[in-house]
Amino acid sequence: MQSWGMTDPGCVRPQNQDAFQIEQLDKNTALYIVCDGMGGAKSGNVASTLAVDVFVEEVRRTWVNGMDPEEAEQMLRGAVKLANFTVYDQAQQLEEFSGMGTTLVAALVQGKWAVFVNVGDSRAYLVNQNGIRRVTRDHSLVQMMVDRGDLTPEQARTYPGKNYITRAIGTEPVVECDVFHLDVQRGDFILLCSDGLSNTMDDQEILFEIVHGVNKELCCQRLLEIGRGRGAPDNMTCVLTLV
């Protein structure tokens, strides 16, 4: 597997509150995570960085070579639980961190399978020559409205309340994550990104840049440059893996 990651504050925000990490667990297994913090200039950054650190450390502590996807799912659920508790507890300790939280999307990839977890509206995609598939489902107001038929996906892209999320790491004592299992094969790409990127590019544009870009090592840079060229009102982060 080859992996690349990059983050950018965008064109409007004075601080980058996104965080990401790529962690090689063994020669055939890797962990990827993106978090998008919220809650003010200081606390959003604290929430995302803390969630990444705790989540990755817990996976490293509990990972056992030879785990099957079901065992990996339980491990990732436990890591989400610990990250949520840690961010929530920190928010209770200091007034300046009150109300902070973060999205979280992560993927554990081993050989021919991958397990994804997400909380919030940071996304995971599977991309290959056959097209692009969004793996995760946003925990957001607009996603609820799309599910009810009140908005089309096209209308949701510009809806005024599109940034309102319905789940986050650290805002409540307990949070529920969604888990997705996928079979993967050589030549597949896995993309994790914060909503700063997915709000500035549609799925087909992302597909074109990943599949048809000549230099895969520069793909993350190209994606963020496109976002900046469109005004990038939010922080943008992407992590790309070639299976």
Image: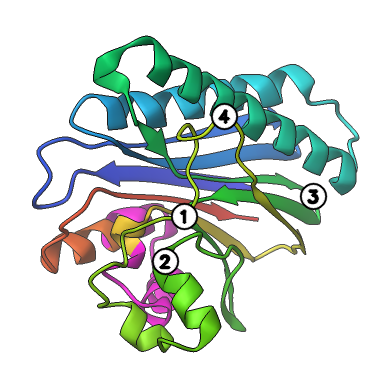
Bounds of the magenta segment: 198-222
Specify whether residue 211 is in view: no
Residue beneath disc 1: 166
Disc with the residue nearer the chain's start (1 vs 4):
1
Task: Report the residue at 61% width, 19% height from top.
Answer: 57
Specify whether residue 68 is in view: yes
Disc with the residue nearer the chain's start (2 vs 4):
2
Tell me: residue 134, above or below residue 89. Answer: below
Residue beneath disc 2: 141
What's the CA distance linking mark 1 and mark 4? 15 Å
Q: Residue 146: x and y, percent?
A: 47, 81
Q: Residue 182: x and y, percent?
A: 76, 62
What's the CA distance linking mark 2 and mark 4? 21 Å
Residue beneath disc 3: 111
Quadrant occupied by the C terminus: bottom right
Task: Report the residue at 65% width, 66% height from top.
Answer: 187
Instruction: Assess whether residue 36 is covered by the magenta stretch.
Output: no
| Three-letter residue code for mark 4 | Pro
Residue beneath disc 4: 173
| Three-letter residue code for mark 3 | Gly
Discs 2, 1 touching: Cβ within 8 Å: yes
As drawn, is 57 to the left or to the right of 152? right
